[in-house]
Amino acid sequence: MYLRDFIENHLLGFSQKNPGVAVYLQPRRHRAPSIVAEYLNGYREVLFLSDKQPSEICKWTEHLRTRSGVQIVKMINNIHTETPSTQGIWHPFMFTDTEWAVTKFPNKKLSSVLKTGKTATDIILDEQTEALTEGVKHCQINNK
């Protein structure tokens, strides 16, 4: 029922937007409505669409269109240990001050920028001023 609505209202627009996708309609009696996607690598995926809304069918057709035809495989991590690291598991707050755990935010002290040393901009500006002062001294020596 819903697939018929999808065919009447959405399939023509889908096929016009995607000229690289071949769309065939095959009426089949006494069978559940389905979409069959056949990819160039030979992979074939069948999606049964009984009782799916037209909007959901649109999402599934878009999903099938954007697939490459390679089967979806769950990636498994083959490494397992019974004894985790004695150093503990890393987390983003590992090397932060423990004071943060009991502080109410926003906090003026913790929101300020910490200046730990010279920035790259400061170093470049210092080098430029040194070069200018040396250039001025060099000019004064040559003029005398």
Image: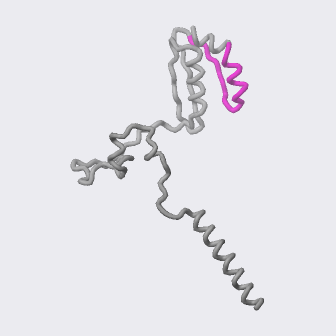
In the picture, which quadrant includes the C terminus? bottom right
In the picture, which quadrant includes the N terminus? top right
Residue 111 appears at what percent x and percent y? 47, 45
Q: Which residue extends farthest right? A: 143
Q: Which residue is rendered at x = 23% and y = 53% of the image?
A: 86
Q: Nearer the viewer, residue 62 or 84?
A: 84
Residue 76 appears at what percent x and percent y? 37, 43
Residue 14 appears at what percent x and percent y? 68, 23
In the image, is 106 to the left or to the right of 56? left
| Tag count | 0
Q: Tell me: residue 87, above or below residue 53.
A: below
Residue 101 appears at what percent x and percent y? 34, 41
Q: Which residue is rendered at x = 32% and y = 47% of the image?
A: 98
Q: Nearer the viewer, residue 23 or 91?
A: 91
Q: Nearer the viewer, residue 42 or 9?
A: 9
Q: Which residue extends farthest bottom? A: 144
Q: Tell me: residue 141, above or below residue 50.
A: below
Q: Nearer the viewer, residue 29 or 63?
A: 63
Q: Main secondary structure of the magenta part?
A: loop
Q: Tell me: residue 109, above or below residue 115.
A: above
Q: Which residue is rendered at x = 59% and y = 17% of the image?
A: 55
Color encoding of the figure: one colour
In the image, is 84 to the left or to the right of 30? left
- Residue 58's image quarter? top right
Q: Tell me: residue 118, above or below residue 12.
A: below
Q: Is residue 26 magenta?
A: yes
Q: Which residue is rendered at x = 49% and y = 58% of the image?
A: 115
Residue segment shown in magenta: 9-28
Q: Is residue 64 magenta?
A: no
